[in-house]
Image (cartoon, rainbow, N blue to C red):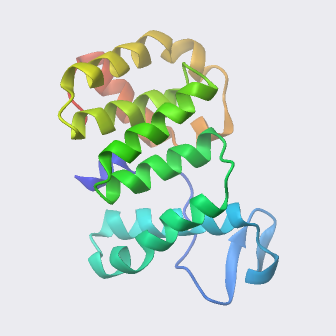
Amino acid sequence: MLAWSLGGGARAGPVSTATFDAPEGTTTLESVSPRDVADNLFNHVVDAATLGDSAELEAFLPLALMSYDEARPLDADGLFHLATLQRIALLHAESLASARGILELHPDHLLGLGAAAAAAEALGQSGVASEYRRRFAAVYGSEIDRSLVEYVGHADFLSRVEIEAASGEAAR
């Protein structure tokens, strides 16, 4: 069930102490930005969660969470990654706060609405989660037409939230 909340998008390979996959290709760790490090750790943690690899999660989830703190300020995509990592870590209140951070930047941001709905549901706030899903459904068409990079990168997540929002199902 963890795979539902995980994002989708391209994944980097396993984290290495020598190299990271950066936007411009494989490079040395010393030349990678804090955000690139955070994004690589995010991809590694998401892959580990999807595979049910608890040893990798235990080893890399704390590093991934810390890396996003070091990469601040975060854009909407970075806040979505942080919210997702916080959900994986069962830090649901923190996840909701990160998702709301996206919505402070852009109130109709689909990743923010979807992450907020998932976090609220995990906190047992079904009414709040339903409101986020209702807003998601209301703005989906106009927002998806914006073709934001983060929407393209997390298309699987958005598709799942769209289905849930249309059917009124709770996030799982």
Q: Is residue 27 left or right of residue 5?
A: right
For residue 131, above or below residue 46: above
Q: Position of residue 83 (x, y in %)?
A: 45, 47
Residue 56 or residue 97, whichever sits in front: 97
Tell me if I can see residue 172 in this picture.
no
Q: Position of residue 14 (x, y in %)?
A: 52, 79
For residue 46, above or below residue 95: below
User: Where on the picture, by quarter, is residue 151?
Assistant: top right
Tell me if I can see residue 33 in this picture.
yes
Q: Residue at x 55, y 75 (%)?
A: 13
Residue 27 or residue 128, whichever sits in front: 128
Q: Residue at x 39, y 38 (%)?
A: 96
Q: Is residue 21 left or right of residue 117?
A: right
Q: Quadrant of the C terminus?
A: top left
Q: How many marks?
A: 0
For residue 43, above or below residue 154: below
Residue 2 or residue 115, whichever sits in front: 115
Q: Residue farthest to the bottom?
A: 18
Q: Position of residue 101 (x, y in %)?
A: 54, 35
For residue 105, above or below residue 118: above
Q: Residue farthest to the top?
A: 138
Q: Is residue 41 left or right of residue 70?
A: left
Q: Residue at x 50, y 52 (%)?
A: 82
Q: Position of residue 49 (x, y in %)?
A: 33, 65
Q: Is residue 61 left or right of residue 93?
A: right
Q: Residue at x 35, y 46 (%)?
A: 5
